[in-house]
Image (tube, helix red, strand yellow):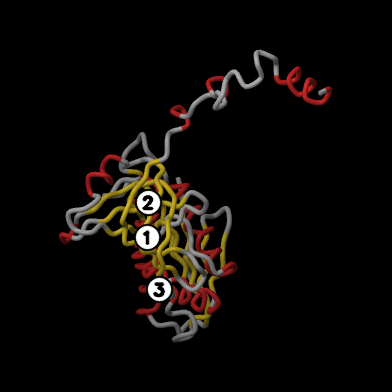
Amino acid sequence: MATVRLRVTGKPGVISVRSFLTVVESAFRVLADLDVAISRDQKGTLDWVVTDLGIGSLMMEAQARPRREDKNIGPEVTEAFVSGLRLVETAGTSPPFLSDTGMRTTQRMLRPIGRDGATGIEVSNLRESTMLTTEAIANIAELIPERQRSLGAVEGKLETISVRGGHPKFTIYLSRTNKAVACRIPEGMLLEEAKQTLGKRVLVTGIVRSNARGEPLSVEAEHIRAFRAPDQLPKTRNLHGIDPNFTGGLSSDEYVRALRDA
């Protein structure tokens, strides 16, 4: 079973209950966001149960319980949780899979660091761990706000479509980083195109909003183009030049040799 461990470091007797509960609640909201992104199931696939509470330290462990026997993504979720937060702490880049909501929840989880006696947050999946410090707070403050807006394009896999609140949008996961990017659809436009390309690799063009690190945050989508699946691409043996009789019936080697001897 996949396990996650949270530990708030600092001076016992000084760290407030509110700070500890903020860390715990926010952490499991982030795990839920990762669950949805990795499983592609809007309702999520995991439940969490407490398996250990630290004595003399602010530590807790929880175990993921899959709701379906045939689908257990707990190990993937806990790995993405720890490795993604390490990216925030050490590289100052956005974690894979997290939505804009997940990023803001992560920021809330980090907020108690440096306050009320809390000096850091250690997260672990029992295979690897990461210590989060005020460096993570400074880094995520650069990753969330929009700093630039320009005409551009993003490329990735279109995975989810939402019409909640009467504001249609879809989410793509960038091919190189798996970063989640929300693409907003103008009313009455592109919704059918989005439905037709669901689950496919696409190129979305429009007004791209980016953060201070140049990472795309969202797109005001104007056009969607689907890439061909690998099995739909032409095979090398089926490719022909513009003029199939260009060499006059000679092989390529014979034609080049004739040119050299001319």
The disc placed on residue 162 is: none
In the rendered image, the residue lying farthest to the right is 261
Task: Kindly identify which residue carries mark 1.
Answer: 99
Closer to the observer: label 2 or label 3?
A: 3
* Front one among 222 and 61: 222
Q: Earlier in the sequence, mark 1 or mark 2?
A: 2
| Amino acid type of the residue tagged 1 in the rendering | Ser
The answer to which quarter of the image holds residue 225 is top left
Is disc 2 surrounded by few (<14), some (14 to 19) or many (20+) residues within 10 Å?
A: many
Crowding around mark 1 (Cα neighbors within 10 Å: few <14, some 14 to 19, many 20+) is many
Task: Say left or right for 170 vs 16.
Answer: left
Tell me residue 236's x, y (percent): 57, 24
- Ranked by sequence position, the earlier of labels 3 and 1 is 1
Rendering coords of residue 149 (x, y %): 40, 70
Q: Is residue 261 above or below residue 228?
A: above
Please identify the residue farthest to the top as the structure is shown. 249
Residue at the spot of label 2 = 37
Q: Residue at x 77, y 24 (%)?
A: 259
Q: Earlier in the sequence, mark 2 or mark 3?
A: 2
Q: Which residue is found at the position 32% from the left and 38% from the top?
A: 68
Quickly name the residue at label 3. 146
Q: Amino acid at mark 2?
A: Ala
CA separation in Å, label 2 and label 3 = 22 Å
Q: Do the CB atoms of the residues marked 1 and 2 lie less than 8 Å apart?
A: yes
